[in-house]
Amino acid sequence: MKRRKFLQTTGATVTGAAMLHGFPIGAYGYTPELAALTNATAATDKVLVIVQLQGGNDGLNMIIPVDQYAALAAARPNIMLPQNQVLPLTAATGIHPAMATAQQLYKNGQLGVVQSVGYPTPNFSHFRATDIWTSGSSSDVVWTTGWGGRYLDGEFPGFPTGYPSAQNPDPLAISIGSVVSNCVQGPTVNMGMAIASTSSFYQLLSGGTDAAPATQAGHELAFIRQVVSQTQVYTTTIQAAAAKSKNLSPLYPAAGQNALADQLKIVAQLVAGGLSTRIYVCQLGGFDLHSNQVPTTGSTTTGAHATLLGKIADGINAFQDDLRRLGVQDRVIGMTFSEFGRRIKANSGYGTDHGAAAPLLVFGSQANPLVHGPNPTLPANAGVNDNVAMQIDFRSVYTSILKDWFQVPQTTLNQLFGQHFPYVPVIKQTALATVASATPVPGFTLYPNPVADQATALFESQGGVVELVLLDGLGREVRRLVDGRVLGQGPQRVPLSVRGLSPGAYHCVVQEGERSSSLVLVVTD
């Protein structure tokens, strides 16, 4: 077949699902009721990194409810970790020993845990559950757009027409991995570009192409890849960003030893190189461990799941170290998710079956370093169908990150997700002061802090209507100190009683008009 004829007969492939070194471009039908309605593009240098754990991560083997160790051990006698091997996060909660670097990140204030994340009426199919998590839909409806894609579509209307431009020269989103995540799928096209593998990225920088078979069809495939690469609009900007920065952390494993670390290494280089891409999606597979989650003989601290958990922890740890050395650590927040957790009870094959809710991690220098929510409640004698019940809806995490990190208004969030979801303070509220579009309340201070009985909230009022509330780790209001009234102009001193509250971290939020600030208040015995 002549090359011209090959191009003519494969034109639909090039335009409809083209591959640039593994960069697929797909299209889905437009759904009007799901279209995001936002204001003008918000200027921000913030970056969100989404880590997709494919297969269904066993959350009870990652974040261990040590206060219910006996019940968990009874349900998992063949895979349970020895209690003395669990690494502590809090007095009641621990983490798998393979994640020692994650424990250190938690201690250093760079990692938070959100407990029992899920959604009502969970689905146990990998495909459907992944669709639900990546789209941000309820389990009883099907959305063809991704939650990040809808956000980006509102920020950059009309994409891809007119893009790139002088104002927006870079990819809006980049997905790295063998499977293109639906998280950034827009109403008509994917809102970003996808890199099929880390080797594809380095070939892009060098101008090379993926290897093709030494056959006639292989030669034609190599040719078409070359043609597409020459017309790929974002190649130059990615090459320029990569040329401006080099990874500095010595903590990255050798190439090919940790797929997640390899992907995060690319993200760090591009962020530090000045690429204005807002969302990156990375992937790590292998979590569907119905059998041989741990070895049939030997220590339950080792095995397939332990290896994967180690890759998560070590990859994120190297990434955070790199961001710090590159001086961009305060610009990046990350989160993990998996399509579902696993059952409470282990099976006879030294594994676990598809389950419901599970914990997720939020990482970065601006992550709120808390265990958000109590440990899941486990039955004393779990049956084969018992699941971890949802405490926090996954869309609460999504909307809270969009609200605090990208300053998306609540009305827009309601439109993006079809309803309002409770707020979860997974990001340090002090980060608001670094965002140009956020106006903090001057002089907001809490003392004493920590507090056992009563604190005082200090702030400057401009004479507007003030609200002052105290929220728990789930974002639920536990005290309303000022209920939408005018306090007068000037310094304010508001008593804040914590009597009757359980010890732990709370969030005190003050709002006056468009100004808002939040501080963590620690309540002690």
Image (tube, rainbow, N blue to C red):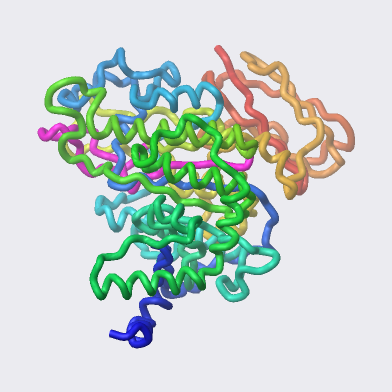
Apparent side of residue 448 relative to residue 463 in the rendered image (left or right): left
Q: Where 142 sits versus 500, above or below?
A: below
Residue 112 included in the magenta stretch of the image: no
Apparent side of residue 504 relative to residue 212 in the rendered image (left or right): right
Instruction: Give the residue at x 41% y 38%.
Output: 360
Instruction: Give the residue at x 27% y 42%.
Output: 287
Instruction: Give the residue at x 28% y 57%.
Output: 127
Name the foreground residue: 239 vs 448.
239
Task: Classify the position of the N terminus by image quarter.
Answer: bottom left
Q: Residue at the right extreme? A: 489
Apparent side of residue 55 relative to residue 381 in the rendered image (left or right): right
Q: Where 492 sits versus 151, above or below?
A: above
Instruction: Give the residue at x 22% y 37%.
Output: 386
Q: Quadrant of residue 413?
A: bottom right
Name the foreground residue: 92 vs 2.
2
The magenta span reads 330-358
Does the rendering let one see residue 102? yes
Prevailing SS of the magenta stretch: loop
In x, y percent, where is residue 157? Answer: 61, 70
Q: Residue at the front extreme? A: 214
Name the foreground residue: 278 vs 83.
278
In x, y percent, where is residue 344? Answer: 24, 33
In x, y percent, where is residue 353? Answer: 20, 41
Does the rendering let one see residue 477? no
Task: Classify the position of the C terminus by image quarter.
Answer: top right
